[in-house]
Amino acid sequence: MNEKTTPDAPPPGEAPPGIDEKSGASTRHDALTWCKSIFYEVVLGRKTLPPSQYGRRIPLRLDQDAPLADERRGGHPYVSNTIRTSRYTIYDFIPKQLFFQFSRIGNFYFLCVGILPLLFFVLVTIAKEGYDDFKRHRLDKVENAELARVLKHARHRVTSGDGWQSKLRGFLTRNPTALETCSTDAPWTTTRWCDIEVGDLIKLSRDDPLPADVVLLHADGENGLAYIETMALDGETNLKSKQVSAALKGYDTLEKIMASDADFVVEDPNPDLYKFDGKITVDGKSLPLTSAEVIYRGSILRNTASAIGIVINTGEECKIRMNANQHPKAKKPALETVANKIVATLAIYVIILSVGCSMGYIMWQRSQERRTWYLQGAQVKFHEIIIGFIIQFNNVIPLALYVSLEIVKVGQLLMLNSDVEMYHAETNTPARCNTNTILENLGQVGYIFTDKTGTLTENVM
């Protein structure tokens, strides 16, 4: 019986059709993914850490010879408690700004047709953005220099000034690393917020802000409760109560807390404010930890004489910083979207007009130029004539549009900062513009929503 061969079947020993195309597409996808990972990790500084195997383990022991190690970082110490709301550093400011500026359609077009006008415009915008970020750096420096009473978890501590970036910054600003701690309330020492580490004990007094995410160990409130204000986290003004874990019942003094030898296992840092998973082990007995026993950075201790907690998250791994979307993209106003559409439409119009004029020249060349003796040998090639028409119609796209918008933004910034009608006398707070790239959005507000009538009747936000 003869076997019939399918006409579409590949010959023996050859791969079916489509395999090469799939492997080639997979290779291109892998190469693109690798390039993106290199760009995000090296240029933008966004590196994703793998999750820990069993969670973050934090023992309550203050006499360790070495700082606690982070499993996700290959045994290196936990991140410092320094935060950074500024988007840039010394070494990544130029690459990030060039990336953000050339993402604009207008900037990319001017890059193709005129380097010098574009260079002037981009440098003006970069200088303005750099000044805004410089102000954020100053605010970060003030917050990181705030003081707290701390018991260090190890004799050797890693300070924020140990890195080469901090040393270089101190050299440039002529501000060497100051004395980190000083004895004030033995055994507690006064420490800068940026030098607080995971595993340290923190003592809080009434109206003290939280410098890091902590698990509550002791509170002087009624029934061991601590009352906190979380307005900076969720916008709510009502106080919330936090309690000490039942595993620490009876450990109501610092000496007993230090002798408890408690062991904490908590979840990896994440931005969820309303859910927390962990456990505490004391004397071989383990109990769960929930958000009722945890106080996050940004909260303020209210109506409680004092409280003690152990640090579990520091710096950029605190809940408030993870929710702040660290190193966000440059904010773009709605008016810029409209301007981009206008520029894109005009660019398409210039291309169509240039192509049409070039085709018209070719038609005229075929019908008329060959008959004129004085134009012999003066023919212009198609690619040359189309480039010439593009340069000729270049002025259709208004460079002055972007320059005018930037000048107007600077004027709006000066007028807003000097507006006496926006001065709050009770708190001595004038109006201050931190990001002048979205000022025009204030003029596009159509509706204002408030959550309570007192905001309107008493004019108090």
Image: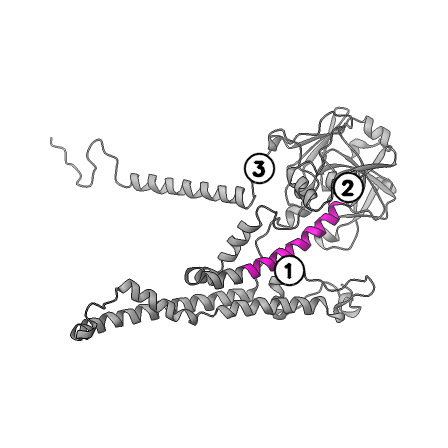
Task: Give above or below for 266 relative to 304.
Answer: above
Task: Give above or below for 75 relative to 140.
Answer: above
Of callouts 2 and 1, which one flags the residue occurring earlier in the amino acid sequence? Answer: 2
Q: Position of residue 338 (x, y in %)?
A: 51, 67
User: SS at mark 2?
Assistant: strand
Determine which of the numbered discs, if any, sits on residue 36 in the image: none
Magenta region: 123-145
Classify residue 420 as left or right of residue 348. Answer: right
User: In percent of the image, x 49 and y 41: which residue is there?
Assistant: 38
- Image marks 2 and 1: residues in contact by CB distance under 8 Å: no
Quadrant position of the N terminus in the picture: top left
Quadrant position of the C terminus in the picture: bottom right
Q: Position of residue 337 (x, y in %)?
A: 51, 64
Determine which of the numbered discs, if any, sits on residue 192 in the image: 2
Residue at numbered disc 1: 435
Disc nearest the viewer among 1 and 3: 1
- Pick the front one: 223 or 254: 254
- Secondary structure mostly seen in magenta is helix
- Pick the front one: 162 or 120: 120
Q: Position of residue 42 (x, y in %)?
A: 53, 42
Which amino acid type is marked by label 1? Thr
